[in-house]
């Protein structure tokens, strides 16, 4: 079974939803202070995981769902190697229909058969990334599911830093005391200050909590570690804009567009650059 890295899933989800409307546009820092959870609480009624699963599965076309159900029916009767092949196919078909949550549920099943720390971590990552883009009522069950997967990964390998960071991210995003999650991620950085995922996570949390100067420091460090992490320029643009430094925000957006491959995204970025340049010109002419 092919395992996707954290960076690959970040890129997939970013391409699918994050950049459809630039994530830094019109964002406001929370009014509740830096210690508050990034999402400021939940306004919608929390759904059960079964409800979230059913809603996600509902987007799968009937003809494809019929094929998936046929494979599900064979799961219990097959040996473990047969089950894994069926699970690979089920996951593939769900993913092809954009049903990430049901696909991840069956990655969990594969992880249980293989007892693999990496597959458990992959399932946790996918649940966490899905929780970032669903409505607030669906977030909690996905975050809790992600934490369960990360815990299973850590039971097999307590040194799996990606599982540790992922669990910390879930806690910060609403599945516990945010400081507990931040300390968990900072613990990783104490052992390895070059861990890119940990630096990105803390940088993103700095933006969400309105600590924009800290975010600038984090993402400049990330780009030194990995100049190919071009999303870092978007985070920097957001942080600089909120600091009132539109010139630096524009500079980082232009850097992003130098590397971006998606033409639709580049158009959105260029439009936002023009907006910032107009704002800057109007401010200078006053």
Image (spheres, rainbow, N blue to C red):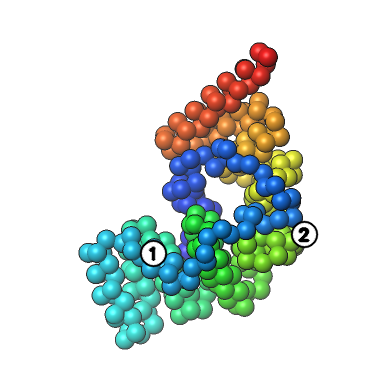
Which residue does the numbered mark 1 point to in the structure image? 55
Circles 1 and 2, Cβ within 8 Å, touching? The answer is no
- The total number of labels drawn is 2
Q: Can residue 21 be seen in the rendering of this structure?
A: yes
Q: The N terminus is located in which quarter?
A: bottom left
* Residue 134 percent coordinates (x, y): 48, 57
Q: Residue at x 36, y 79 (%)?
A: 83
Which residue does the numbered mark 2 point to in the structure image? 190
Q: Residue at x 37, y 57 (%)?
A: 98
Q: Can residue 198 be seen in the rendering of this structure?
A: no
* Residue 112 percent coordinates (x, y): 48, 79
Q: Is residue 266 above or below residue 101?
A: above
Q: Nearer the viewer, residue 163 or 139?
A: 139
In the picture provided, is 165 more to the left or to the right than 25? right
Local secondary structure at mark 2: helix
Local secondary structure at mark 1: helix
**Quadrant in the rendering for residue 69:** bottom left
Look at discs 1 and 2 and give the one toward the viewer: 1
Q: The C terminus is located in which quarter?
A: top right
Q: Residue furthest top?
A: 285
Q: Residue at x 49, y 28 (%)?
A: 271
Q: Nearer the viewer, residue 149 or 41?
A: 41
Q: Residue furthest right?
A: 190
Spatial CA distance of label 1 from label 2 is 41 Å
Q: Is residue 20 above or below residue 73?
A: above
Q: Nearer the viewer, residue 92 or 19?
A: 19
Q: Is residue 138 above or below residue 281?
A: below
Q: Counting residues from the N terminus, which is met first, the one under dot 1 or under dot 2? A: 1
* Residue 188 percent coordinates (x, y): 71, 61
Disc number for residue 285? none
Q: Residue at x 62, y 78 (%)?
A: 155
């Amino acid at each position: 079974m092919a395992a996707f890295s954290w960076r690959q899933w970040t890129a997939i989800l970013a391409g699918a939803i994050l950049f459809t409307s630039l994530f830094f546009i019109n964002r406001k820092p929370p009014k509740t202070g830096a210690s508050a959870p990034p999402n400021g609480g939940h306004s919608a009624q929390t759904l059960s995981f079964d409800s979230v699963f059913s809603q996600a599965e509902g987007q799968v076309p009937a003809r494809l769902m019929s094929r998936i159900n046929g494979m599900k029916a064979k799961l219990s009767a097959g040996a473990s190697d047969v089950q894994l092949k069926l699970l690979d196919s089920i996951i593939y078909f769900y993913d092809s229909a954009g049903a990430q949550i049901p696909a991840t549920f069956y990655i969990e099943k594969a992880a249980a058969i293989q007892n693999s720390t990496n597959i458990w971590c992959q399932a946790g990552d996918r649940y966490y990334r899905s929780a970032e883009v669903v409505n607030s009522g669906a977030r909690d069950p996905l975050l809790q599911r992600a934490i369960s997967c990360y815990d299973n990964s850590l039971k097999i390998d307590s040194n799996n830093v990606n599982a540790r960071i992922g669990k910390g991210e879930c806690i910060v995003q609403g599945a516990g005391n945010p400081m507990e999650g931040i300390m968990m991620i900072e613990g990783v950085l104490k052992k390895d200050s070059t861990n890119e995922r940990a630096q990105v996570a803390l940088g993103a949390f700095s933006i969400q909590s309105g600590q924009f100067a800290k975010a600038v420091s984090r993402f400049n460090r990330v780009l030194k570690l990995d100049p190919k992490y071009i999303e870092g320029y978007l985070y920097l643009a957001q942080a600089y804009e909120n600091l009132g430094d539109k010139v630096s925000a524009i500079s980082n957006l232009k850097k992003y567009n130098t590397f971006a491959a998606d033409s639709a995204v580049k158009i959105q970025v260029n439009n936002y650059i023009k907006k910032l340049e107009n704002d800057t010109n109007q401010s200078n002419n006053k």
